[in-house]
Amino acid sequence: MTKVAIIGAGPCGLSTLRSFEQAEKKGEKIPEIVCFDKQEDWGGLWNYSWRTGSDQYGDPVPNSMYRYLWSNGPKECLEFADYSFDEHFGKPIPSFPPREVLYDYILGRVKKGNSKNKVKFSTTVTNVVYNGSNFEVTYRDKKKATSSTDIFDYIVVANGHFSVPFIPEYPGMKAFPGRIMHSHDFRDAEEFRDKNVVVLGSSYSAEDVALQCHKYGAKSVTIAYRHNPMGFKWPKGMKEVFHLDRLEGNKAIFKDGHIQETDAVILCTGYLHHFPFLSEDLKLKTGNRLYPPKLYKGVVWQNNHKLIYLGMQDQFHTFNMFDCQAWFARDVIMGKIKVPDSSEIEKDINKWVSMEKKLENADQMIDFQTEYTKELHTLSDYPKIDFELIRKTFKEWEHHKVENIMTYRNKSFSSPVTGSVGPKHHTDWETAMDDSLKTFLNQPKK
Ligand SMILES: Cc1cc2nc3c(=O)[nH]c(=O)nc-3n(C[C@H](O)[C@H](O)[C@H](O)COP(=O)(O)OP(=O)(O)OC[C@H]3O[C@@H](n4cnc5c(N)ncnc54)[C@H](O)[C@@H]3O)c2cc1C
Ligand SMILES: NC(=O)c1ccc[n+]([C@@H]2O[C@H](COP(=O)([O-])OP(=O)(O)OC[C@H]3O[C@@H](n4cnc5c(N)ncnc54)[C@H](OP(=O)(O)O)[C@@H]3O)[C@@H](O)[C@H]2O)c1
């Protein structure tokens, strides 16, 4: 029997488990599956942890999410085609839920099946090598402190790529009297109440961490971009300046001449694709981009078609794109989809990579990833979902952010699965301090 190892039980690993479960429900004979996760429970980044640094076993903590994190995109854009928000919550809910609500939704789908008994928790995959015909996978049971090696025919790498921080150094950091941290270790904006905060970066973490600090009472927030500013209309107390030059004592000195007294520097400088468990010949080497190289259909490793990577792209689309990837990967593994010859693969990868190079703005990037996801969708029996509505929703969302970065999370969108419209939330995001599921779902009766 074919044996498949899934490394990671975050959203991508769970999509893979779900895809096989759906095939089994249709009466198909599925491979033997073992999913490994080094955390004690499933959900990946959505499984919030207060921990930073190492866990109790000495393993680096993978979690990068923080208290008060709300979805930064409309939930309608990530909805599962086979498990709508309406089905999970029994009613339509607002379009921008906090973390705990999305976590509940992600788990709701897999809890209905029997996938959990396929997952080995608190188990870290430490080594994967290809011996010419199959993979030797070594894993460590953290609780028992034992190591084992098993043989697998296919590997699905679903370990995420937002867990290992990229941490640059700037002159003056060693002598800085305040706090320096990466967004990976950011857990609670309350810590920065009444403080002057400098945030480095110009992408989603910089935007959201800066907004969090402002929302929870930071005295000032100064965001320093390196190449392009985000350019939003920041509220009073926030500003965007050009690139940090150095720290001198407690002063941050920027390349555009700005000087800012600062208590804390938060490095929102992104993450590394990091696969310490894979032998060099199997390792994807890429930055955070929309079409990482050497992946056929963004999924199958060009040099070894039994190695599958999921969710390695920079992400506008998330959960339903992961599903489309998982359904495609499942059908490759089950022999229903034939991977073409190497020249065809090369041609297909080059087509996407050269299209990616020409992208100039967010709308084009949304179009690119929508086209990619739509193509994958046509290749499997993943259920019907309206990707044209998702494309439109993403673009409206981008424009709402430009209009007002403080209010875009108060907007409502239509479901690409059920068509229902998200109701307006009872409290505007800017004043909603409680991010619990209970408070969020407790919509006052009309
Ligand atoms: C701060 C932050 C906020 C985000 N907010 C949103 C959002 O609002 N909406 C959205 O759609 N997306 C968001 N994302 C994007 C996020 O990447 C995806 O939603 C999703 O979590 C990716 O799923 P994944 O399964 O690829 O990776 P992860 O969620 O990272 O899961 C990977 C799993 O692999 C396990 N693992 C890693 N290495 C090993 C190993 N060697 N052995 C065993 N197990 C291993 C980890 O323990 C983890 O459980 C956010 C990301 C970050 C960093
Ligand atoms: N739900 C939420 O609200 C939420 C919150 C946070 C994050 N997220 C998600 O988390 C994921 C990761 O986002 P991310 O912003 O952490 O990573 P990212 O999108 O990869 O962006 C990395 C940023 O780091 C900057 N950078 C890199 N090296 C630098 C240096 N030496 N000095 C200054 N800046 C540097 C880059 O700037 P250049 O452009 O100049 O290279 C870029 O702006 C995304 O999927 C995002 O959606 C979601």
Image (cartoon, rainbow, N blue to C red):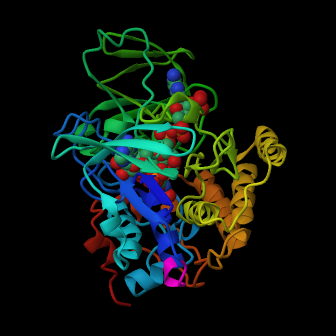
Q: Nearer the viewer, residue 323 or 233?
A: 323
Q: Is residue 119 magenta?
A: no
Residue 78: horizontal and vertical position, in percent? 54, 66
- Quarter of the image with the C terminus is bottom left
**In the rendered image of this protein, does residue 83 appear above or below residue 16?**
below
* Residue 26 among those drawn in magenta: yes
Tell me where residue 235 appears, x and y as whole percent: 47, 45
**Horizontal side of residue 341 vs 28, given as left or right:** right
Q: Is 236 above or below relative to 31?
A: above
Does residue 401 show up?
yes
Q: Residue 55's image quarter?
A: top left
Answer yes or no: is residue 432 visible.
no
Magenta segment boundaries in residue numbering: 24-28
Asked if residue 433 is positioned above or below residue 55 in the image, the reply reads below
Q: Main secondary structure of the magenta part?
A: loop
For image coordinates 72% across by 57% down, the residue present is 372
Horizontal placement of 280 versus 268: left or right?
Answer: right
* Nearest the eye: 35 or 351: 35
Q: Quadrant of residue 194?
A: top left
Q: Residue at 81% of width from left, 44% of height from top?
A: 355
For the image shown, how many numbered marks are present on the structure? Answer: 0
Residue closest to the eye, 296 or 107: 296
Vertical position of residue 382 compared to residue 92: above or below: above
Q: Which residue: 54% across, 73% down?
A: 412
Depth check: give the residue in front, 122 or 225.
122
**Image position, residue 258 (x, y; %):** 50, 18
Give coordinates of residue 413: x percent, y percent: 58, 73
